[in-house]
Amino acid sequence: MRFAPRCPACNLDFDSFNVGDGAAAFLTLGIGTIITILGIVVELTFEPAWWVHVALWLPLTIVAVLGTTRWTKAALAALEYRNNAGEGRIERRP
């Protein structure tokens, strides 16, 4: 998922942001933890067949990660803008 090159309302240059794939990795780890806990609870409570786990958790994981990637990338870009973050800059304080 990519940003538009510029904001249509204020003409802010989105190409200057370096969000990358950090959002997807963060979401995969976070949502993967939640899905794993839910899978363990379902297994210990209901003891379903293995294919029930595949049918439940695989689509849920994919939908959850893809559904929240846009929001997370936007939040990372907003934090980068607010904090005036940039790559490779070190400010020395006296």
Image (cartoon, rainbow, N blue to C red):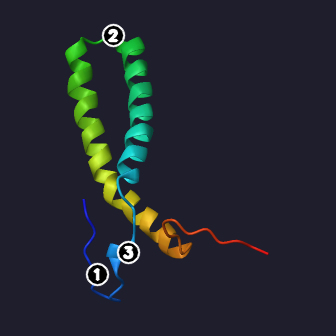
Q: Which mark is residue 48?
A: none
* Residue with the mark numbered 1: 6
* Residue with the mark numbered 3: 16
Q: Which mark is residue 47?
A: 2
Give the Cα distance between marks 1 and 3.
Answer: 10 Å
Q: Earlier in the sequence, mark 2 or mark 3?
A: 3
Q: Around disc 1, counting alpha carbons within 10 Å, would you say few (fewer than 14), some (14 to 19), or many (20 or more)?
A: few
Q: Residue at x 38, y 31 (%)?
A: 35
In this rendering, which labeled residue sits more in front, label 1 or label 3? Answer: 3
If the image is split into quadrants, where does the N terminus sit?
A: bottom left
Rendered view: 61 above or below 21: above
**Residue 81 x, y percent position in the rendering:** 48, 74
Q: Nearer the viewer, residue 36 or 88?
A: 88
Q: Provide the secondary structure element on which disc 2 rests.
A: loop
* Disc 3 residue type (three-letter): Ser
Q: Nearer the viewer, residue 19 or 68?
A: 19
Q: Residue furthest bottom?
A: 10
Q: Residue at x 37, y 15 (%)?
A: 43
Q: Residue at x 48, y 66 (%)?
A: 87
Rendered view: 65 above or below 17: above
Q: Around disc 3, counting alpha carbons within 10 Å, would you say few (fewer than 14), some (14 to 19), or many (20 or more)?
A: few
Rendered view: 83 above or below 21: below
58 sits to left or right of 12: left
* Disc 1 residue type (three-letter): Arg
The image quadrant that residue 69 belongs to is: bottom left
Q: Earlier in the sequence, mark 1 or mark 3?
A: 1
Disc tally is 3
**Residue 22 x, y percent position in the rendering:** 40, 52
